Every structure is written in C-alpha cells, then in structure tokens.
Image: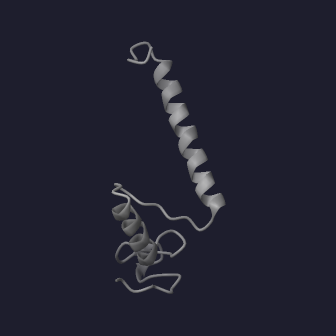
Amino acid sequence: MPPVFQTSTYVQSSPGKPIGDYEYSRAANPTRTALEDALASIENGARGLAFSSGLAATDCLSRMFKTVILVKTSLMNTTDSPLT
C-alpha cells in the first residue's frame, strides 16, 4: 500500500519545473493517483477518476458531453463525413 502524501507542493528544480510527475497537490498527487489506479483496476477500466466534490464531477461530465456534441456536430456539417 502506498503512503499518504500530506503536502501541497513537491520538489522542483525551479518554479514551474517539477522533478517527477507532481508539482502541486491540487492538480495531481501520488495519493489520488493510487486511488484512481485502484478504482480502474476494481472496475476493469482503462482509467479511474477521483474528484474532490460532486460539483467537480458534474462539471467534468458536462464539459465532456459538450465536447462530444461539438465534435459530432462538426463531423455532421462536413461534406465528406460518414455521418451524413
């Protein structure tokens, strides 16, 4: 089991240039990455996502659906689209 990292910032060679995968804990951190990986494994998924609140999850889903709708609309408006 990985340890719980209780920090807000990680080692950086200079501001904005992290050493490793993590810069600031609100963006990403090893504890959340471990949770997301565990959820993906349990659900046999390619990726797991963890949010700090239901509102954050709802916002992510609404933005995802908006993107899907925009892409499909764009594809349907082209003359050589397989969807038309």
47 horizontally vs 59: left or right? left
Left-right relation of 25 to 17: right
- In the image, is 21 to the left or to the right of 52? left
Colouring of the image: one colour
Work out whether 3 lies above or below 48.
below
Q: Which residue: 39% across, 86% down?
A: 3
Image quarter (top left, top right, bottom left or bottom right) of the C terminus: top left
Q: Nearer the viewer, residue 18 or 24?
A: 24
Which residue is depicted at the point 42% across and 60% down?
Answer: 48
Q: Nearer the viewer, residue 44 or 56?
A: 44
Residue 47: percent from left, percent from top: 38, 57
Foreground: 56 or 7? Answer: 56
Q: Quadrant of the N terminus?
A: bottom left
Where is residue 31 drawn, in percent x and y? Answer: 44, 77
Please state the total of marks drawn on the protein image.
0
User: Could you say where residue 14 lies in the image, as x and y percent from the top left?
Assistant: 43, 79
Residue farthest right in this picture: 55
* Residue 2 in picture, x, y percent from top left: 36, 83
User: From the viewer's perspective, is residue 36 above or below residue 64?
Assistant: below
Residue drawn at x 41%, y 65% as measured from the top left? 39
